[in-house]
Image: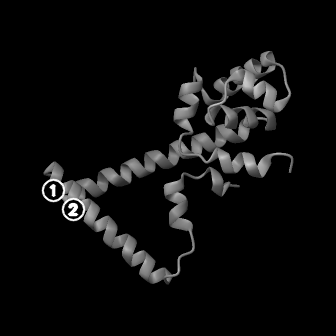
Amino acid sequence: MINMFLIPTYIRRLFRINQESDESRIFLQDQEMIVLVRKVAEQQDRSEEEVITDFARMGWNQYWLRNDLDQCWDSLSDREQEVTALICLGYRNYEIANTLSIAPGTVKAHLQNIFAKFNIRSRRELRHALKDWDFIEWWDRNQHS
């Protein structure tokens, strides 16, 4: 099950209920896309079809990347998810240890497991991979619930 708060903000905006009807919202989104495609095609001196093909390819790649990240996230234990969230919120190991009432060595062990599950090597890579996720909202919803 997909957690809406972990979906990037710019995508969540598309799902928000609007005052407008679905038809008019779709029309406005279509118009925005047409303008964007034309602008990019003109800037890059390419056909609109080439731009649309590239957009679709990037979207497909992004979809699979997102799916991979979701699977990695789901493979984390509850504590590893908490550590991941705090890392992405900019906490240092000692701050994570204090917040979660665990030893700093335990934080390091969790980080090793997290890095292995995401196939990354650093906190920076983890923050970059999950940069669009809303961990403030996730943290607020998941603490002591």
Q: Is residue 83 left or right of residue 25?
A: right
Give the residue displayed 80% in from the left and 20% down from the top.
Answer: 106
Give the residue displayed 49% in from the left and 84% down from the top.
Answer: 21
In which image quadrant can residue 99 be found? top right
Task: Indicate the quadrant containing the N terminus: top left, top right, bottom left or bottom right.
Answer: bottom right
- Badge 1 vs badge 2, beta-carbon distance below 8 Å: yes
The spot of residue 34 in percent (x, y) is 28, 67
The spot of residue 92 in percent (x, y) is 67, 24
The spot of residue 108 in percent (x, y) is 73, 18
Q: Label 2: which residue?
A: 38
Q: Is residue 42 left or right of residue 87?
A: left
Give the class, few, some or many, for how many residues have Cα within 10 Å of label 1's Cα (few <14, many ≥20).
few
Give the class, few, some or many, for how many residues have Cα within 10 Å of label 2's Cα (few <14, many ≥20).
some
In the drawing, what numbered circle is on residue 42?
A: 1
Q: Secondary structure at mark 1?
A: helix
Give the residue displayed 51% in from the left and 58% down from the top.
Answer: 11
Toward the left, the furthest residue is 45
Three-letter code for the amino acid on which mark 2 is drawn? Arg
Q: CA distance from mark 1 to mark 2?
A: 6 Å
Give the residue displayed 56% in from the left and 33% down from the top.
Answer: 127
Q: Is residue 19 or residue 56 the one in the foreground?
A: 19
The spot of residue 110 in percent (x, y) is 75, 24
Q: Is residue 38 left or right of residue 109?
A: left
